[in-house]
Amino acid sequence: MESKYNFRAIEAKWQQQWADQQVDRTPEIDARPKFYALSMFPYPSGNLHMGHVRNYTLTDVLARVRRRQGYRVLHPMGWDAFGLPAENAAIDRGVPPAQWTHQNIAQMRLELKVLGLSYDWEREVATCAPDYYRWTQWLFLQFLDAGLAYRKASKVNWDPIDQTVLANEQVDSEGRSWRSGAKVEKKLLTQWFLRITDYAEELLQSLDSLPNWPDRVKAMQRNWIGKSIGAYLEFPVVGSTEKIAVFTTRPDTVFGVSYVVLAPEHPLVKTLTTPEQLAAVEDFQQSVAAQTEEMRTAEDQPKRGLATGAQVINPFTGELVPIWVADYVLYEYGTGAVMGVPAHDERDHKFARQYELPIREVITGSPDIQESAWTNTGILINSGAFDGLFSPEAKTAIIAQATEQGYGKGQIQYKLRDWLISRQRYWGCPIPVIHCPSCGIVPVPASALPVVLPEDVKLTGRGGSPLATLASWVDVPCPRCGEAAKRETDTMDTFIDSSWYYLRYPDARNDQAIFDPALTNDWAPVDQYIGGVEHAILHLLYSRFFTKVLRDRGLLKFDEPFQRLLTQGMVQGLTYRNPITNQCIPSTLVNPDDPRDPKTGEVLKVGYETMSKSKYNGVAPAQVIENYGADTARMFVLFKAPPEKELEWATTDVEGQFRFLNRIWRLVYERSQLQASGNVPEKDVKTLSRAINIAIKEITEDLDAAEFQCNTAIAELMKLTNALTDFSDPSHGVFQSGLRILVQLLAPFAPHLAEELWSNLQPETGSIHTQQWPTFDAAALVVDTFTLVIQVNGKVRANLQTALDTPQAELERLALGLEAVQRHIEGKTLRKTIMVPQKLVNFVVN
RNA sequence: GGGGGUGUGGCGGAAUGGUAGACGCAUCGGACUUAAAAUCCGAAGUUGCGAGAGCGACGUGGGAGUUCGACUCUCCCCACCCCCACCA
């Protein structure tokens, strides 16, 4: 054994050996309980960043511990490999997307291997590989077959210069294209959708079956699904056969309607406007259309509206009320029209005040209805036959009447929209359908999958869907009638690819089926899923949706894909920001003791922010591994903060972990260099034995699924190391066994170092990663003395080392006899004595 | 505006209602060294009295409450962070 901790040699040696011996292969299914540990797979952007290191280390620790606790573990890795950056690289640098992506995957795979993550690389998947997207396409056909995939016209962001569709993120706040700078138009295109709204209610309800998901993720999903319970009501238009339909959650306020409002985009606007008002209303529509989303929804945006001159009849009162158009009504939500009840809705109140519309109180409770809206429930007034009812009862009664008389019904409304999956892009999974002039939309037969993405496409970033330019690919015979037909040229949203990848790992090499249901139903659902909170809504919601659809197709036997979810915090770096210009300054240009802008001399704001190139606050994992080794990097990200919190990068703390690993190394190395000192007091032996068993107990509990606190687990490792360091006789059996336990407990966190030390301590037993996880001896935790804490009126005044079997009366007598206690009860009356066995005694005096 | 979360030393953070600040970082003192680095040992919440050993007071964002006892439970308030948001 070398005297120095040579992490480079050790890590290289064991990584080689583990790979050669394939120690991380997934076992066959057997009687042992299964454990499926999964990190969200990365987009292969080029290099690993610290967030990845943190994410994958957390999952790796769990996988390593569960293996040794007798589980059969599935711990795979793959690549979310379709997406826009590859296409941009092609446009900017002329590298084909496939080549760019595969280079990045190779680089990142290498970096993952250097971290010593125990993946079963045999099951690696890449969503851009034909043997993967073949099954993405097969899934699409399943959705199509189930009636869950359909086409409809939808508004998209259209760049008139580049002649292409843009994602929302590619349109800046001024409504201009990120690439061409052109003003983006809304264009109506026929697009593919998945009918996720069919599952809205179940996606909402079954959140309750996920107790081990963070509350905030569940709250975000609930919010996104956005269920409201209310009523659908129809208001007949005066002098027309048209009716204006509204959705309201407050049917109990319907007697307070003083106008109805249409969204400017509502198709009835022009039909219903009176001739006198038409020019003004069209003007208004145009000025609203010119606004960007951001302008329209900006805070404190004054509500703008215009009367159409037409009127509707309130079917409950027979009253005539005006029809308005206003920009505060959203066409996309509900019916695109609302009933205006100024007395009991804040927006309507503001609007009514602005345009001097009547404010009529129909629910009691408001101190001054002209001053502000009363949005709480209350007793109905001015509401005809419904007067005197409490809001909830009134809702029911009013819905009943509307249903009976045929002008409305109870309705549940969701914010969730069907999922638009069409992308007019190249680097994605082709949608496997063919458009035939006589047969219509014809699915590509499953036997003809995959529809392979052609490689000879010229990418320019303009001119619409790149695939459409390749006639040799587009023109195909119709699979049904054989006549000339055309392929669909849209590709799928990449969120589709990642909505099912966790189902593929249990049977990743299957070339006959998407997976063998026997295998996937055995390994899945995922027992522990770990990833960034940025996926709290979309990826996790889509995956849940896919799981439920596949269950309904008979492929899966479970309802939810991820049993337990951990959203790890961001990794942040020290950031220097000029408070005036808001620019970040690289730390190399800043004196940390007096941080100033090197150009302006401005005192800089110092703080931690999410690592990014533009903030000059990033740290490359490769650099850290080069300087300190993978084990130190792993220890640092695990120790510095609990997993769900932000992690502030600090090189001094990295060095602290490096020191700690060095201490362990020396402890093992020096144990044979020291001479036995002879007699060790029995007391010391017991103390060490206790420390060893406490460490086993605490670390095991910290790595329990519910706890999973690696930071405190490592703190326990440090305590045990301290206890061993303090022990006087390294030749003693208890020390020797303590050393072995320490190394065993260290193994999930610092797998290379632990393996190296183990091979020195106990070469005959083989890899430490195959050793059973240590269990603690409850008997060793028992103490024969304890510290009795003595309080007077709840304040600690003294403590006392006492034998465990001291009778309670004796303890009280001893405690009362102490001078420090006497001082505080002197001259007072003892009212009560509280005794907590083996812990404390509290004397209550006054 | 709605929802979720967080507030503990100089810093990151520990604490089944029972000695608040484990463990680490930074700091200070000491040992080793010609010196430095590395390493080892030790100190340290704030504050008052004391030469010192020590003895007190205060202390987990603020205020009430429950309790013998509250970082922990309940209510009110404040600050900050995240998500959603003119969603009818």
Image (cartoon, coloured by chain):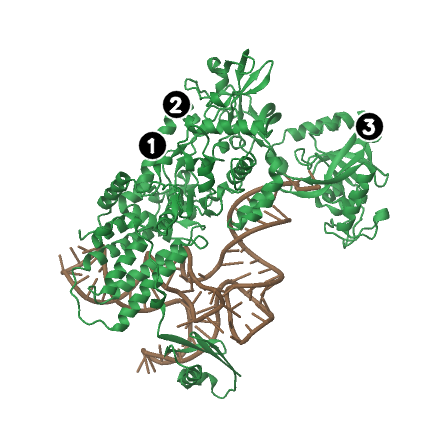
Specify the colour of chain B: brown
Q: Is A126 displayed left or right of B51 in the figure?
A: right
Q: Quadrant of residue A89?
A: top left
Q: CA distance from mark 3 to mark 2?
A: 59 Å
- Give the residue pinned by disc 3: A241
Tell me which amino acid carries mark 3. Answer: Thr
Task: Judge by depth and name the residue closer to the eye, A617 or A54.
Answer: A54
Q: Residues within 10 Å of mark 1 (few under 14, many from 20)?
A: some
The spot of residue A207 in percent (x, y) is: 57, 46
Q: Are marks 3 and 2 on the same chain?
A: yes
- Mark 1 belongs to which subunit? A
Q: Secondary structure at mark 2?
A: loop
Q: Are marks 1 and 3 on the same chain?
A: yes
- Residue lying farthest bottom? A827
- Give the residue pinned by disc 2: A96
Q: CA distance from mark 1 to mark 2?
A: 16 Å
Q: CA distance from mark 1 to mark 3?
A: 66 Å
The spot of residue A538 in percent (x, y) is: 53, 38
